[in-house]
Image (cartoon, helix red, strand yellow):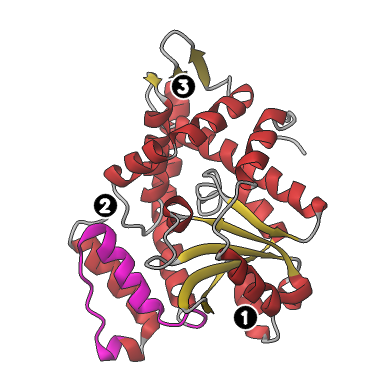
Amino acid sequence: MTDPEKNAPLPEKLLKTIAAQCMRSVAPDYVVFVDALLERFKTAADAVILYGSCLRTGNLDEGIADLYVLVDDYKHAYTQRYLSLLNAWLAPNVFYLEVSHQGRTLRAKYAVISTADFEKGARFWFHSYIWARFAQPSRLLYTRDDANRQRIYQAFAYSTLTFLRSGMRALENSAFTVEALWTRCLMLSYGAELRPENETRARHLATTNLIDFTQLTRAAYPALTDLLSYQPDSDTYLCQNTPHTRRRALRHWMLRRWQGRVLSILRLSKATLTFRDCLDYAAWKIERHTGVQLEITPWLRRHPIIWGFVVIWQVLRKGAIR
């Protein structure tokens, strides 16, 4: 497979770095999630991926694990036709999972997407929904076979390149440390979704994952030399944009911001059909990161699709997202 922008092979070092990060050990508790998901999706399951805050903190007792289930075909994955249609229309579908394990209740939300759509999202989607998430280190908890494993590693590699390319094109011509580079790129992707994270959160994420992000940046660098120049004396990367490139990139990110608001409303509305207690979860998530408390009235519980529009208005009005 080739990089769609340079028509060159993916850097071998990037694939090896991603493979090493994906295969790191995780808490044995995650096995019960994998077992439950394989019981549900059976032979349709291509892979189960762990990402997000619980991966970074390792705290499953108070957190909700973030998982992706990759399936071979939406029709194969569901017995209810409407779920396969929703997934094909606007991937992914999001569900909630609780499992009992050693006297504890473990919780997860999991997104379902076909392996083919996951690959397209990493490589070709204009919006950052897939490639911004999976440029960051993840863990591969299950794969059907080695062929699927390699497809997922390649999708992660494309995510990393797309994330860095899209972000760096919007930056000024200056030298950036890895921490600053990823902080700025993360902020752009956060702004493209209805997400409550702010610059402090992005910087914290870049600092916490600095070793991994440094490895990924170094491994991806051979495919980014048209945009970056490594400065070994200062261990920084000099961004080399033309004014036209930067103006165009900033316009693209502005479009992603508005596209992301529409997609967020649609995904929140769709989640009311698939995600139990999705309103409470979304309200908790936003309050946790912004301090903005969102009231869920009985009327809104009876009309959950409208809640997506209400949430955007309240969060924007209170200045949590600009």
Residue 272: x and y, percent? 45, 81
| Residue 6 appears in the figure | no
Tell me if 117 is positioned left or right of 243 in this view: right
| Residue at the spot of label 3 | 241
Answer whether residue 295 is visible to the viewer in this image: yes
What secondary structure is found at the residue carrying circle 2?
Answer: loop
Disc 1 crowd rating (10 Å Cα; few below 14, some 14-19, many 20+) is some
Q: Is residue 187 left or right of residue 163?
A: left
1 and 3 marks in contact (CB < 8 Å): no
Identify the image quadrant of residue 262. Answer: bottom left
Check disc 3 and report its element: helix, strand or loop: loop
Earlier in the chain: of badge 1 and badge 3, it is 1
Residue identifier under label 2: 322
Closer to the N terminus: mark 1 or mark 2? 1
Residue segment shown in magenta: 273-300
| Residue occupying the point 76% across, 66% down | 72
Residue denoted by label 1 = 83
Q: Residues within 10 Å of mark 3 (few under 14, many from 20)?
A: some
In the rendered view of the protein, which quadrant contains the N terminus?
Answer: top right
Q: Residues within 10 Å of mark 2 (few under 14, many from 20)?
A: few
Q: Quick one: label 3 or label 2, which is nearer the N terminus?
A: 3
Marks 1/2 in contact by CB < 8 Å: the verdict is: no
Q: Amino acid at mark 1?
A: Leu
User: Going by the image, does 28 lie left or right of 148?
Assistant: left
Which residue is at a point 56% across and 49% down the rendered structure image? Answer: 138
